[in-house]
């Protein structure tokens, strides 16, 4: 059965998640995480993707990025995936598939969702019960975004920059966002839109995306029959 094409538009923020095959581990050591991030930075620069936030979990990856072309994200993930799988297979003397077949993603283009997605990504280790605060987790972008640690990988989103003109005040304003838990409904919205490959935003925003892409970009109303090309 045909899979629904991904929603990709140049210059529009995208949240994506890639899981290990059958949700198996894809990171086994700190060295693996470091290798992945180094090649993520290389491939992001090569293919014109600005990475805003990231989190590496044992069996999946979260990224928030903005592509410069419609092909940028696919080329980034293809190049990164190939290099990382080769590294893992060589290091651990294994063979076969490492990643789930396709990464899942959703388009974002509003302050309420872009900054919420920053937090959604960096709070992942807290929701998983690994740490009590995102600053305690090494393999996410929180320390760079919230504490000013240097990162050659990250490129701040304009809405992140708009928090303050001063770097220290911007980091402080960003930390302030983490004083409160993300609303459970908002977490579900981000998770559902990403897993289903939909756009996430106001009705005006989704209408604009539908016009640009020429197809439906949000879930249908309950009871509405699904067309063949709407199915995963």
Image (cartoon, helix red, strand yellow):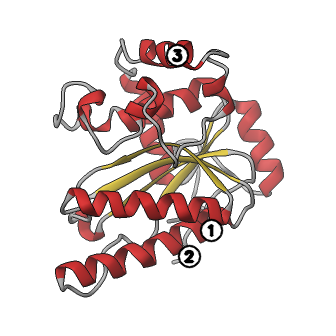
Residue at left offset 21%, top offset 38%: 128
Confirm or deny contact between disc 3 and disc 1 (CB under 8 A).
no
Q: How far apart are marks 3 and 1 (CA)?
A: 48 Å
- Residue 229: % across, % down: 62, 68
Q: Between disc 3 and disc 1, whose residue precedes?
A: 3
Residue 4 is at least partly visible in this image: no
Above-or-below relation of 121 to 99: above
Residue 149, x across and y down, in percent:
42, 32
**Location of residue 104 in the rendering, given as x and y in whole percent from the top left corner:** 48, 58
Real-space CA distance between mark 3 and mark 2, rounded to the nearest whole angstrom: 48 Å
Snapshot quadrant of residue 18: bottom left
Q: In front of the other: label 3 or label 2?
A: 3
Please report the residue visible at 18 percent of the width from the left and 85 percent of the height from the top.
93
Q: Position of residue 140 (x, y in %)?
A: 36, 41
The label nearer to you, 3 versus 1, is: 3
Q: Which residue lies furthest to the front in this view?
A: 150
In the shown orientation, is residue 123 left or right of residue 106? left
The residue singled out by tag 3 in the image is: 168
| Dot 1: element | helix
Q: Foreground residue, 21 or 75?
A: 75
Q: Is mark 3 on a helix, strand or loop?
A: helix
Given contact means CB atoms under 8 Å apart, are the residues at marks 2 and 1 in contact?
Answer: yes
Which residue corresponds to the image point at 61% horizontal and 62% vertical from the top-left? 73
Q: In which quarter of the image is residue 206?
A: top right
**Residue 61 in view, yes or no:** yes
Location of mark 2 (residue): 2
The foreground one among 21 and 159 is 159
* Tag 1 residue: 229
Question: For this view, does 167 lie left or right of residue 56?
Answer: right
- Mark sitting earlier along the chain (3/2): 2
**The disc label shown at residue 127, or none:** none
Instruction: Relative to 166, say whether 55 is above or below.
Output: below
């Amino acid at each position: 059965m045909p899979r629904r094409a991904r929603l990709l538009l140049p210059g529009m923020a995208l949240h994506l998640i890639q899981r290990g095959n059958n949700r198996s581990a894809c990171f086994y050591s700190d060295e693996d995480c470091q290798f992945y991030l180094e090649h993520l930075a290389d491939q992001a620069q090569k293919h014109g993707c600005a990475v805003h936030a990231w989190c590496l979990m044992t069996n999946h990856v979260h990224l928030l990025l903005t592509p410069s072309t419609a092909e940028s994200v696919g080329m980034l993930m293809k190049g990164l995936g190939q290099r990382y799988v080769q590294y893992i297979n060589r290091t651990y003397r294994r063979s076969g598939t490492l990643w789930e077949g396709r990464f899942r993603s959703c388009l974002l283009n509003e302050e309420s969702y872009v900054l919420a997605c920053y937090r959604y990504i960096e709070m992942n280790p807290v929701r998983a019960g690994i740490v009590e605060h995102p600053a305690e987790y090494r393999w996410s972008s929180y320390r760079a975004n919230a504490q000013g640690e240097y990162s050659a990988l990250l490129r701040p989103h304009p809405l992140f920059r708009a928090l303050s003109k001063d770097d220290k005040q911007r980091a402080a304003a960003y930390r302030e966002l983490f004083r409160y838990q993300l609303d459970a409904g908002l977490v579900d919205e981000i998770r559902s839109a990403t897993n289903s490959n939909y756009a996430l935003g106001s009705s005006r925003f989704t209408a604009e995306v539908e016009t640009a892409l020429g197809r439906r970009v949000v879930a249908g109303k309950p009871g509405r029959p699904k067309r063949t090309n709407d199915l995963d």
